Image (tube, rainbow, N blue to C red):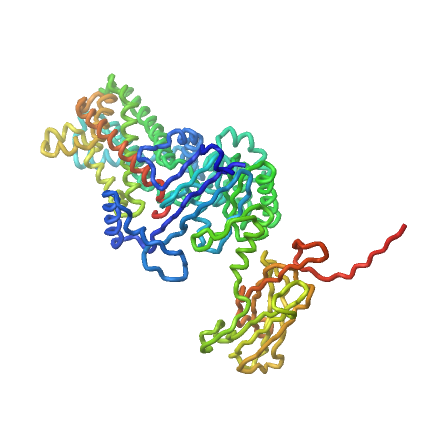
Amino acid sequence: MSNTVNEKWDLEINAKSSLFDLKLKELWHYRDLLILLVRRDFVSFYKQTILGPVWFFVQPVVTIAFYTIVFGGLAGIPVDGLPKALFYLAGTIVWNYFSDCLIKTSTVFKDNAAMLGKVYFPRLIMPVSIVLSNLVRFAVQLLLFVVLYLIFLAKGEHIAPNYFALLLPLLILMIASLGLGLGMIISAITTKYRDIAFLVTFGVPLLMYATTVVYPLSVVQTQHAQYAWIIKANPITAVIETFRFGFLGKGTFSWQLLGYSALSTALILVAGTVIFNKVEKAFVDTV
Amino acid sequence: MSAVIKVEKLSKAYQLGDFGTGTISRDLERFWARLRGKEDPFLKIGEINDRSTKGTTGVVWSLNDINFEIEQGDAVGIIGRNGAGKSTLLKILSRVTSPTTGSLKMRGRIASLLEVGTGFHPELTGRENIYLNGAILGMRKAEIKRKFDEIVDFSGVERYIDTPVKRYSSGMYVRLAFAVAAHLESEILIIDEVLAVGDAEFQKKCLGKMGQVSKGEGRTVLFVSHNMAAVKTLCNKGIVLANGQLVYQNKQLEAVSFYQTNNNTKSSFEHHGDLDSAPGNENIRVLKFVIRSLEGESISISTGLSFDLTFFNQKAGINLDATFELKNSDEIPVFHNGTLISTNNDSKTGIYTVKGIIPPHLLNAGNYAFKLIFGENQRYLLFGADDFIGFEVENESEGSNSFLAPGVIHPKINFTVNYQV
């Protein structure tokens, strides 16, 4: 009988398992699924529309038009002497990437409960696919930024990129990790009790005002110094400021601030991954 | 043969009721207990999971201490009533959820089909969905590409392959979805009642494909179904679950009959007590229904049987009729016969009895269930009861043959044999 045969199993499931068993090998096996999910999100976004992928541009264009009128015009917030459209666009696309990642990841269990309740694949695939499909959107919007950039350059504006623009891959990685990490923490908390989900829906848009999207850090530091620490404590501030400084040549850059931001992002990502991994095993029972 | 699945002391508890403000204190208590390394205070009391009785704790054990092994190449039917824990077991085996206690070990690649078309996106075309669904089920892209034509061919929706699946008929949708799943290359295949969909032709095709999977390719199949005929044809072993516990495990035919006899234990019914609590409604109350062998104690092929129905009619002045429908254990109707009780709109309030006889040498051995239907003018339903009573016809040997002959009926046929040179 089987008792005599070697007891080597391919898969063992126990009631308890290690916190740090992330099953990365399995994740790698499912890489095709990851690509297909990203493709699905991208394609299904503009299916049955006439303009198709053009819709990826419409949202940021309309947004910066309004920002230019409201914050630049009516409120008269200075923008470090940069072209308003470019200033707002730089902040908006980075912020959008972060908030899209966060909001989508935080509801990943709830949104996909039907599918996740019927078939097994490494659950980590879902949040990672969200981050990647938003990365595609980010890339498309970055293209818009480049086009606008060239237009202003041709018009003879004083904008000059410097070597700090080469930090872009790091900045993207940080934003993605931050959105992913925070989103996974929230998704884990909300599988059983949905309270925090309400906080996300109205909290994330408000958080934008604690980030240097519609104003530069320099204004806060000179005019409202007592609040500056709050804005600096927000890890996204350093990313947006570095992005602007690198591409537009003006902004507040400091290695300390960026270092702090990178460190806190890494911590949030690790915490998020571990918590997510713990919850994913039995979330189906409570979601 | 070696075991490919080994389940040890597997249990799964679910929390009943709604989650809200009231449950957070309990969660904190559990968390605190776990933090101190103690046992979960709410999982101590093990109750048998019986849906119809009220429990004393808010926790229900959907599976309770399940142990079994499955060997390579086995096709195992998992049977049991609704709520017996079949789907929970499959969910744990396919890793959708994790057990509360116990462990599970497997060897080889597992594909599970708890639902067809999981992850199908309505906006994407059939072609795109084949790739997506295949990847969700664990296939690599190259693998899907290699089998693409075969999948399309099997599904029979070639013409629609570049149309979004939201425009598909539900049958086409299911065909495509099953086709993807049927082409999974895995050592273990787990299937949950997905055959309840699709038309008869396609169901047959699926059953054929699955039979091919388990018998031809040496794969291990776990199959949950209420369709006993399908279990019988596909599986060589059976596991019977009841109230979250494993109650029987053996060859499939024995398991099926174990399940069926336990399902219809009542072979006579007699109501005691007041009229209003008898089964029925404001028109009809059934008081008694008894099945007896015509010869001796037990019913077998050659004895025949009688059935006696006593009921209280509360609808006077109508044309009343009573119909008996007999189904075998594969849910196939054997007959649907009735009798008129009154013909001139002159039914009376009071007790009626109807007696019927099923002659010897008609029914084959097996389990049967009666359905009762009371009608007005042979048109309007006054009262109907499915599976009102069950009984078993025992097999008997004919000459040297003692095995169960296939067939819905087993009549006595007058054969004449001639020999010519």
Residue A216 found in image quarter:
top left
Q: Residue A77, image x and y in percent?
A: 16, 32
Task: Give me the residue at 45% from left, 74% from top.
Answer: B277
Can residue B159 be seen here?
Answer: no
Q: Residue A268, image x and y in percent?
A: 25, 33
Does residue B18 sit above or below B237 in this rendering? below
Q: Residue A213, image x and y in percent?
A: 22, 32
Task: Give me the residue at 25% from left, 55% from top.
Answer: B22
Nearer to me, B143 or A21: A21
Does residue B312 sit above or below B166 in this rendering? below
Task: Give me the residue at 33% from left, 27% from top.
Answer: A144
Q: Residue A284, image x and y in percent?
A: 37, 45
Nearer to me, B273 or A33: B273
Nearer to me, A265 or A215: A265
Q: How many marks?
A: 0
Task: Give me the residue at 20% from left, 30% from top.
Answer: A237
Left/right of residue A7 with respect to residue A17 in the rendered view: right
Does residue B132 sit above or below B25 in this rendering? above
Kindly give the residue lying farthest to the top in the view shown.
A163
Can residue B119 be seen here?
Answer: yes
Left/right of residue A233 with respect to residue B329 in the rendered view: left
Kindly give the residue lying farthest to the right in the view shown.
B421
Left/right of residue A70 with respect to residue A56 in the rendered view: left
Q: Quadrant of the N terminus of chain B?
A: top right
